[in-house]
Image (cartoon, rainbow, N blue to C red):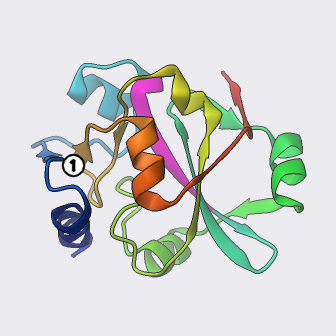
Amino acid sequence: MSLESVRQFFAEHAPEIEIIELAESTATVGMAARAHGVTPGEIAKTLSLKVKNDVVLIVTRGDARLDNRKLKAALGAKARMLSVDEVINWTGHPVGGVCPFGLENPLTVYCDVSLRSFDEVLPAAGAIHSAVRISPKQMAELTNARWIDVCEAI
């Protein structure tokens, strides 16, 4: 159902964006980069975190890692990753298909400034075999995301 919620989201907000569906899984950054013929950095991974009593999503380039010190400074508290069940319950998307579009619940979305290195990125689209090609700027606009600097390159 999650792919359908993303399909509905784009039909309503950006009908020009097409969902790419592949036969093979794109559940990890490496798998997605190979399947789409891009560098791992061009994959926009969405991290689901609990900060105090809030669940937030952070979208970052695929080859970056959260910097806990920067994260705590930006969000005012330590964060923890959600469990698989929590991810599904909060986002409506399976792990490996999580994206900031077509969410089950309204969540605060942040985009890490690392995404600005690319003209176009590929976030998942609600399933482990789907994605969209989108500019980081448009992704942030469509999801009302705020830009923050919470990652480090790896």
Magenta segment, prevailing SS (helix, strand or loop): strand
On the picture, is 60 further left or further right than 127?
A: right
* Residue 24 included in the magenta stretch of the image: no
Bounds of the magenta span?
A: 41-48
Is residue 17 shown to the viewer in this render? yes
| Residue 114 against residue 148 in the figure, above or below | above
| Residue 127 against residue 2 in the figure, above or below | above
Where's residue 137, x and y in %? Answer: 45, 39
Which residue does the image show at 55% across and 76% down from the upper left? 86
Which residue does the image show at 44% across and 37% down from the upper left? 136
| Residue 125 against residue 33 in the figure, above or below | below
Q: Camera-side residue: 74 or 78?
A: 74
The C terminus lies in which quarter of the figure? Answer: top right
Q: Secondary structure at mark 1?
A: loop
Graded by Cα atoms within 10 Å as few (under 14), some (14 to 19) or many (20 or more), the crowding at tag 1 reads: many
* Residue 42 included in the magenta stretch of the image: yes
The N terminus lies in which quarter of the figure? Answer: bottom left
Which residue does the image show at 25% across and 67% down from the upper left? 9
Q: Camera-side residue: 4 or 109?
A: 109
Q: To which quarter of the image does residue 95 belong?
A: bottom left
Q: Give the tally of numbered discs.
A: 1
The residue tagged 1 is 129
Which residue does the image show at 47% across and 24% down from the upper left? 41
On the picture, is 21 further left or further right than 106?
A: left
Where's residue 8, x and y in %? Answer: 19, 70
